[in-house]
Image (cartoon, rainbow, N blue to C red):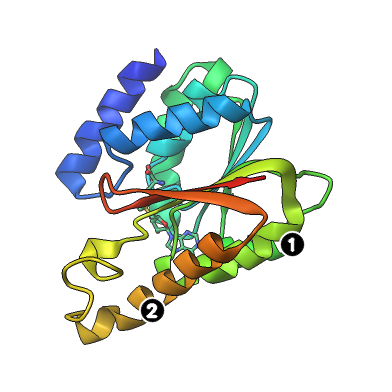
Amino acid sequence: MEVNKVLELQIAYAAAAAVPIIRAREAAVFSRVIQERNPKIVLELGTAIGYSAIFIASVAPDAEIYTIEISHDMAEKAREYFAMAEPEIRDRIHLLEGDAGEILADWSRDRLIDVAFLDAAKGQYPDYWRKLQPVLSDKAVVLADDVLYHGYVDGPYKDKVPRRQRTIAKRLREYIQLITEDPSYETGIYREGDGLAVSRKL
Ligand SMILES: C[S@@+](CC[C@H](N)C(=O)[O-])C[C@H]1O[C@@H](n2cnc3c(N)ncnc32)[C@H](O)[C@@H]1O
């Protein structure tokens, strides 16, 4: 099936089943940043139903996309959509089922990552960032979704974070500090959606 048709089906499914996927305005930033780098290896943490993986494959024609998902049910759903896509797309997407932090810890230095997209456990972003550093290529870009987390990180609700969200908000603040203070990166945070951080290696 033509890739745009698969993406349309996924958007409809995500809306009906309340699965969070990248939004249209973020997708535009995505394609710009990704095409800038013409990546060969992309790593995504958090596949869900595979919408962003298929989207990335469609805007990065030379890339192999590795995508990690912890939920077996989500992984199964993603596989269904991957199977619908044309071979040119589906043959470049590699779904790894398991915990993103664990798989990342064992990532081979023979497969350096050009673009990483963090969209799995928000409370683990600082850990993902640290584990990524040795396995990123020279001109890598790291994108991280939802870093402003409903305004709890630096927005109007910063001082009104519900108790059960406090650890995540704290870890996201730590993540923002890590990426903005690292002199090897230039970072911008797009406020579309829930905050998309883009960190380009200098
Ligand atoms: C926001 S969704 C991903 C959406 C997807 N990137 C897209 O835009 O189409 C987050 C996904 O991360 C998965 N996830 C949460 N914790 C994880 C972990 N520790 N390791 C791998 N995946 C995880 C969830 O099961 C969920 O499917």
Label number found at residue 66: none
SS class of the residue under badge 1? loop
Q: Amino acid at mark 1?
A: Asp
Residue contact between numbered discs 2 and 1, judged by CB atoms under 8 Å:
no
For residue 1, say whether it is visible.
no
Judge whether 37 appears above or below 2 on screen.
below
Which of the pair 127/170 is nearer the observer?
170
> Which residue in the rendered view is the most extreme toward the bottom?
163
Q: Quadrant of ligand 1?
A: bottom left
Q: Where, quadrant-wise, is the C terminus in this rendering?
A: top right
Callout 2: few (<14), some (14-19), or many (20+) C-alpha neighbours within 10 Å?
some
Find residue 179 and report its horizontal and vertical position in percent: 54, 61
Which of the pair 24/186 is nearer the observer?
186
Find residue 64 and report its horizontal and vertical position in percent: 64, 31
Judge whether 91 appears above or below 194 on screen.
above
Q: Residue at x 69, y 44 (%)?
A: 113
Q: Residue at x 67, y 64 (%)?
A: 131
Find residue 75 and report its horizontal and vertical position in percent: 45, 48
Judge whether 161 appears above or below 84 on screen.
below
Which of the pair 160/109 is nearer the observer?
160
Q: Is mark 2 within 8 Å of ligand 1?
A: no
For residue 96, say whether it is visible.
yes
Judge whether 139 appears above or below 132 on screen.
above
SS class of the residue under badge 2? helix
Q: Amino acid at mark 2?
A: Lys
Label number found at residue 170: 2
Residue at the spot of label 1: 106
Callout 1: few (<14), some (14-19), or many (20+) C-alpha neighbours within 10 Å?
few
Q: Where, quadrant-wise, is the N terminus in this rendering?
A: top left
Q: Nearer the viewer, mark 2 or mark 1?
A: 2
